Image (cartoon, rainbow, N blue to C red):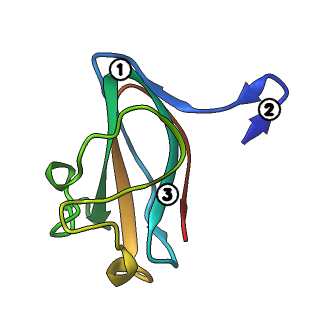
Amino acid sequence: MLRTDGFVSVNAPFRGGELSTKPLVFAGSKLEINFETSAAGGVRVEIQDESGSPFPGYALADCPEFIGDEINRVVAWSGGPGVAGLAGKVVRLRFALKDADLYSLRFF
């Protein structure tokens, strides 16, 4: 989203915070995020089923913490960056943020 005063983001302080999306269906094989963290912050992503349980291999514990300022970071889990096996299914995304801003996400 672009507003007259700049870009809108979801922000979490140093103590941390979480954001979960509404159920959604996507097409594509990878998930890309635009985010910014402090040197002590981070972002991790979990992909859940419609009831909120993580899909195997896509839990927060499977996602390394991303640190920095990137406009097109492809999210990867311990099994790799591919999400094509979940395309067309109803999913929720859970973001764990610490001293971070999340600006956007997209599947491609």
Badge number at residue 75: none
Pointer 3: residues within 10 angstroms few (<14), some, or many (20+)? some
Which label's residue is closer to the chain start, 1 or 2? 2
Q: Nearer the viewer, mark 2 or mark 3?
A: 3
- Across and down, in percent, residue 43 comes to 35, 38
Would residue 97 be visible to someone looking at this image? no
With respect to residue 59, does 87 lie above or below?
below
Label count reads 3
**Dot 1: few (<14), some (14–19), or many (≥20) neighbours within 10 Å?**
few
Q: Disc 2 to disc 3, how far (Cα)? A: 22 Å
Residue placed most toward the observer, 36 or 9 = 36
Q: In the image, is 8 to the left or to the right of 29?
A: right
Secondary structure state at the residue bearing disc 2? strand
Disc 3 residue type (three-letter) = Glu
- Residue at 55 percent across and 71 percent down: it is 108
The residue pinned by badge 3 equals 32
Q: Residue furthest toward the top? A: 14
Q: Secondary structure at mark 3?
A: strand
Residue type highlighted by circle 1: Ala
Residue 7: image x %, image y %?
70, 32
- When the figure is inspected, residue 8 is found, relative to residue 23, above or below; the finding is above
| Distance CA(mark 1)–CA(mark 2) | 27 Å
Circles 2 and 3 in contact, beta carbons < 8 Å: no
Say left or right for 7 vs 15: right
Q: Which residue is mark 1?
A: 39
Q: Residue at the spot x=31%, y=59% of the render?
A: 76
Residue annotated with mark 2: 3
